[in-house]
Image: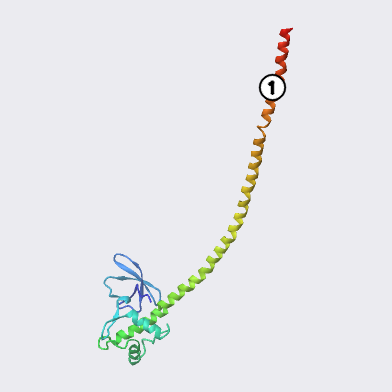
Amino acid sequence: MDLSGIISISGKPGLFKVVAQSKNNIIVESLIDNKRIPAYSTDRISALEDISIYTYEEDVPLKEVYISLAKKENLGVAPSHKESMNTLTAYLEEILPDYDQDRVYPSDIKKLFQWYNILHKAGLIKLEEEKKEEKKEETKKVAPKKKAETEKTEEKKPAAKKPAAKKPAAKKADDKKETEKKKAAPKAKPAVKKEAAKKATPKKATKEDKEKK
């Protein structure tokens, strides 16, 4: 249950939520009719998260009292502040048995129940356990989407690997053909030289014969 930013202004009915702040004042929004008004430093402002209830031992924060009330009512509506004081005090004793009956005035008890119902109507009465469950449900909804994305990527990966394996085989075959051609080419050169040598030998013989003659 988050009571941060929820305030009470003396002389003005209901509760307000702080929505903006400036140098000279703050802008608050009523939780009853959603109207926005300015609140000044001269106003008596009380933040609900700072309010505590007197007990015979230690003061109990208002937030903890409201959590106990919410659990008792199963997040339902509390008794109306217009009920008799006997009904309200008896109810308060059930959720906070050791509250100081001398320092907690009847007007404080009425405000306690009135504020709770205003917060309930505004949808601000929530337990931390419920928030955790909502987060778990959100994570469950997101999880299947991630699984579907991974499955799609896994299906695409093997398709890309198959054509890549065929390419090196074709290159090796071409390389073998080129090397065979290169090896075959130099064998023809010595054959030409031998023929040239054979043709040159009869020319020398004819010159010598002419000189003798």
Residue 24 in view: yes
Towards the viewer: 14 or 3? 3
From the viewer's perspective, tell me whether residue 109 is left or right of residue 178.
Answer: left
Q: Which residue type carries mark 1? A: Ala
Residue depicted at 34% across the width and 80% down the height: 64
Residue 94, how many percent across, how many down? 35, 89
From the viewer's perspective, tell me whether residue 85 is left or right of residue 172.
Answer: left
Q: In which quarter of the image is the N terminus?
A: bottom left
Label 1: how many Cα within 10 Å (few below 14, some 14–19, many 20+): few
Residue 18, how many percent across, how many down? 35, 71
| 10, above or below 89, in the image | above
Residue depicted at 48% across the width and 71% down the height: 138
Q: In which quarter of the image is residue 182?
A: top right
Q: Quadrant of the C terminus?
A: top right
From the viewer's perspective, tell me whether residue 71 is left or right of residue 51.
Answer: right
Q: As drawn, which residue projects farthest toward the right?
A: 213
Q: As drawn, which residue projects farthest toward the top?
A: 213
Q: In which quarter of the image is residue 3?
A: bottom left
Q: Mark 1 points at which residue?
A: 197
Residue depicted at 49% across the width and 73% down the height: 137
Residue 144, how many percent across, how many down? 54, 69
Query: In the structure shown, which secondary structural element does the residue marked by tag 1 occupy?
Result: helix
